[in-house]
Image: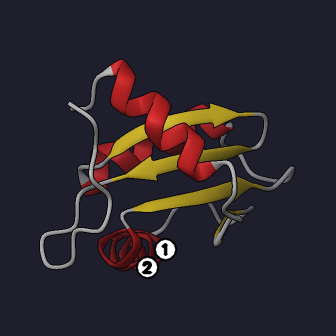
Amino acid sequence: MINSKQRSYLRSLASSIQPIFQVGKNGIEDAFLKQVEDAIEARELIKISVLDNSEYSAREASDYICDRIKCDGVQAIGRKFVLYRKSTKNAKIELPK
């Protein structure tokens, strides 16, 4: 669980990154979750966009993915959301206390 100061720091880092995945009309399947989990392990901080034809809102998709792969939702704005989880092998981001 991250606190508000850490969340603010992660939001500032996420502002410059592009979404690497899209949630579309197929929803969130196990294969998609595996790809997200691999990416979050490698990068720690990822941004995902939700297409207009998706049944999920950005907040719903974020909550669902966080519940399934045990990560933290940093923010959900419009059709995009940001996820964070500290890497077990290759930690790059140092969070403020």
Q: Disc 2 marks which residue?
A: 35
Quarter of the figure with residue 78? top right
Q: Amino acid at mark 1?
A: Phe
Q: Residue at x 29, y 52 (%)?
A: 68
On the question of residue 29 being in view, the answer is yes
Give the left or right position of residue 34, taking residue 61 as reference: left
Q: Which mark is residue 32?
A: 1
Q: Compared to 28, does 5 lie above or below?
A: above
Q: Are marks 1 and 2 in contact (CB under 8 Å)?
A: yes
Q: Which mark is residue 57?
A: none
Q: Residue at x 55, y 39 (%)?
A: 11
Q: Residue at x 73, y 62 (%)?
A: 24
Judge depth for marks 1 and 2 and give the one in front.
Answer: 2
Q: What's the CA distance linking mark 1 and mark 2?
A: 5 Å
| Within-10-Å neighbours for mark 2: few <14, some 14–19, many 20+ | few
Residue at the extreme right = 52
Q: Compared to 61, does 53 lie above or below?
A: below
Query: Looking at the picture, how far across and down is residue 35, in whole percent?
Result: 43, 79
Q: Amino acid at mark 2?
A: Gln
Give the left or right position of residue 48, taking residue 79 as reference: left
For numbered disc 2, what is the local secondary structure? Answer: helix
Query: Looking at the picture, how far across and down is residue 72, in whole percent?
Result: 34, 41
Residue at the extreme left = 88
